[in-house]
Image: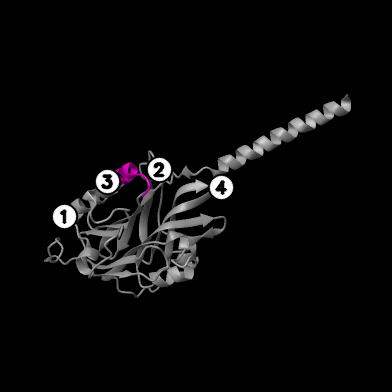
């Protein structure tokens, strides 16, 4: 009998331990949304060349698809090559697991400041979100979760205040959900309202998962004082594009698209300058 009781106790202990392990694994597998956060400055920020003239500067947006190119190969060096020449870029679908952080790796490769803004946590890692790389100083940043009722992929918007020599520039970088139209509409409207509420100059960058026929996009493009330079300056931009750059209070002098297969999204960029006093705030025709 003592032997049987001992075996029963051991069986119970093993069952309890097994149950606890299973619960721990299940809990760790759940994707959990990250809350708001804020701070000052960027990681590893040190202007690459203090003598650089930023009277004009280039900003861009790229969904890096976790670094995976159209050929299925994951290569951050190729992504860094596409980002060369930009002074600020908003990145989407950036991952961080363990000691590996794609935002950090790209920032170090390009020798610019970086900020990772995770939108979700899974397996106890802040595994997925947005990022910003910048050679321009950032005085303040804020991570703002976007509304999410049906979709559990979780999204956020990153707000930055750039410290330009002519004055502060307010920047939003974001990635709106795709899978659930009701959440996508709410998130897109929230991002647009935030952009329009910012003091000029202001820039909105990101994968909005909305094409040019989306009513919210059409309304924003038609709004007085808002410039959409890629559509205005680039010959035949991709018809199916969902990545956008909107600008208020700055002059757009050039724009372009780079599609080198480093992701399933192209890189979009615009070159900006501070408007002179005599210039109108409306986009040039």
The quadrant in which residue 137 appears is bottom left
Residue 175, given in percent of the width and then of the height, sits at 36, 53
Q: Which residue is mark 4?
A: 123
Q: Earlier in the sequence, mark 2 or mark 3?
A: 2
Disc ID at residue 151: 2
Q: Earlier in the sequence, mark 4 or mark 3?
A: 4
Separation (CA) of disc 4 from disc 2: 19 Å
Q: Looking at this view, is 234 or 269 the one in front?
A: 234
Separation (CA) of disc 4 from disc 3: 31 Å
Residue drawn at point x = 74 percent, y = 30 percent? 12
60 sits left or right of 123 in the view: left
Residue drawn at point x = 32 percent, y = 53 percent? 209
Task: Residue 179: say if magenta.
Answer: yes
Residue drawn at point x = 45 percent, y = 57 percent? 94
The quadrant in which residue 186 appears is top left
Quadrant location, the N terminus: top right
The stretch of residues the image draws in magenta is: 178-187
Q: Earlier in the sequence, mark 4 or mark 2?
A: 4
Disc ID at residue 222: 1
Q: Earlier in the sequence, mark 1 or mark 4?
A: 4
Q: Which residue is mark 3?
A: 189
In the displayed structure, 80 sits above or below 145; it is: below
CB atoms of marks 4 and 2 within 8 Å: no
Residue drawn at point x = 71 percent, y = 33 percent? 15
Separation (CA) of disc 1 from disc 2: 30 Å
The quadrant in which residue 262 appears is bottom left
CB atoms of marks 1 and 4 within 8 Å: no
Q: Residues within 10 Å of mark 2 (few under 14, many from 20)?
A: some
- Helix, strand or loop at disc 3? helix
Separation (CA) of disc 1 from disc 3: 15 Å
């Amino acid at each position: 009998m003592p032997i049987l009781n001992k075996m029963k106790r051991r069986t119970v202990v093993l069952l309890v331990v097994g149950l606890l392990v299973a619960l721990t694994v299940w809990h760790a597998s759940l994707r959990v949304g990250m809350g708001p956060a804020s701070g000052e400055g960027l990681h590893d920020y040190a202007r690459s060349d203090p003598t650089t003239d930023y009277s004009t500067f280039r900003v861009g947006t790229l969904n890096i698809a976790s670094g995976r190119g159209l050929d299925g190969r994951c290569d951050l060096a190729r992504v860094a090559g596409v980002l060369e020449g930009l002074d600020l870029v908003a990145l989407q679908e950036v991952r961080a697991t363990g000691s590996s952080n794609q935002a950090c790796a790209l920032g170090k490769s390009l020798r610019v400041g970086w900020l990772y803004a995770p939108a979700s946590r899974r397996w106890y890692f802040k595994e997925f979100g947005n990022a910003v790389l910048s050679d321009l100083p950032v005085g303040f940043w804020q991570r703002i979760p976007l509304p999410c009722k049906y979709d559990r992929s979780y999204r956020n918007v990153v707000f930055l205040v750039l410290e330009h020599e002519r004055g502060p520039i307010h920047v939003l970088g974001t990635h709106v959900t795709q899978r659930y139209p009701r959440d996508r509409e709410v998130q897109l409207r929230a991002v647009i309202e935030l952009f329009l509420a910012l003091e000029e100059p202001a820039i909105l960058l990101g994968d909005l998962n909305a094409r040019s026929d989306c009513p919210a996009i059409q309304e924003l493009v038609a709004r007085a004082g808002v410039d959409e330079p890629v559509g205005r300056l680039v010959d035949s931009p991709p018809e199916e594009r969902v990545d956008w750059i909107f600008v208020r209070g700055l002059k757009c002098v050039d724009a372009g698209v780079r599609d080198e297969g480093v992701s399933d999204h192209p890189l979009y960029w615009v070159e900006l300058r501070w408007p002179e006093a005599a210039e109108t705030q409306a986009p040039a025709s």
